[in-house]
Amino acid sequence: MIGALKFGPQALVEEAMRFNQRLAAGLSTLREVDDVDFGCTPKEEVYREDKLVLYRFKGDKPPTAKVPILIVYALVNRPYMVDLQEDRSLVRNLLARGEDVYLIDWGYPDRSDRWLTLDDYINGYIDRCVQAVADRHGLDAINLLGICQGGAFSVCYSALHPDKVRNLITMVTPVDFHTPDNMLGHWARGMDVDLFVDAVGNVPADLMNFCYLMLKPYRLNFQKYVGLVDILDDKTELENFLRMEKWIFDSPDLAGEAYRQFIKDFYQGNKLVKGGLEIGGRAVDPLAISMPVLNIYAEQDHLVPPDASRPLGGIVGTDDYSELAFRGGHIGIYVSGRAQREVPQAIHDWLAARNG
């Protein structure tokens, strides 16, 4: 059998020796590793409410864009995946192209936030942040960039407040939650969410992380840590790995009532495409989205498959709808080298053509 695999005992011994050498080198490298963090771009706080903080990023030069971008991230995980480190930052690359970038940091919900609803998040927090940015620039409408669940929120917001959104950009945003390849959708449809939320209150971050990791259990729980051995002697690569791990496991709990509504109306009811969605007692009609829309999705996304994102073009009311397919995954769209070259430039060019 060994001969059939074209390696013999000597090759196994040599590989074992190389493995031990890497582990020994890793012990030395770990002593040199700095404390890793994320969020590399300078920023200033411009608005605060409850746990939420609204930031404006500061570039190396003043922005040239006349209409600012407000990034609306998902409630799960921290928003600084868009600004992970200097050479992996959507924010930094947008600033370098003259864009004026703001971001909503949702903070860490606690038991006092147990009863926050989707209405509180969309017609409350997002609306007041949009207004704060618009007032600072003397504008009636701004550009909205919604990411993942934050993209779904941004679609709802743009449908409810179309006069306040100049251009809508969505990234890896789920729209159709019932596609055959959406594993999260299959799991959520069989869930008794009322029993779950009534029992636990806010949804623990560790539980959510466990669910995401189990979507690719071998790749995310075993393979990547085996691969870690290959970079133990490289301080920079090791710090990059640890920075990503820190972001993955630095997750907020989720407000129980908002989670209940999101599972019922989006994952189970699929109301964004089927109709019947209401936020705060108001019907959410995607046909009211009359502003230009750019929908960016990742072709190898296991959390939001392309088929879950592309239907956005069929439900909005605008004639100015564009799609950008990125060759990568749900996280690679922010941090890969290709993403740094392609995504910020595509967003900038698309906005420049519409902001005049």
Image (cartoon, rainbow, N blue to C red):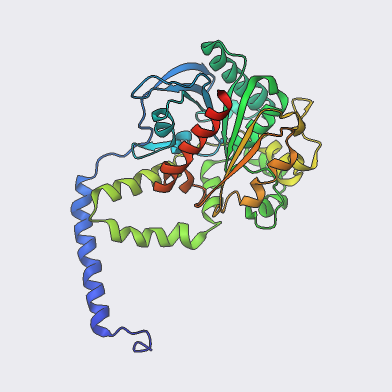
Residue 30 % position (x, y): 23, 50
Q: Quadrant of the N terminus?
A: bottom left
Q: Quadrant of the C terminus?
A: top right
293, 82: nearer the viewer: 293
The image shows residue 168, relative to residue 268, as above or below, that is above
| Residue at x 34%, y 89% (from the top left corner) | 3
Q: Is residue 4 left or right of residue 263?
A: left
Q: Is residue 127 left or right of residue 89?
A: right
Looking at the image, can residue 202 be seen? no
| Residue at x 69%, y 57% (from the top left corner) | 180
| Residue at x 54%, y 39% (from the top left corner) | 76
Looking at the image, can residue 226 be seen? yes
Residue 137 % position (x, y): 52, 13
The image shows residue 274, relative to residue 158, as above or below, that is below
Residue 146 % position (x, y): 58, 34
Q: Is residue 269 left or right of residue 153?
A: right
202, 13: nearer the viewer: 13
Q: How many marks?
A: 0
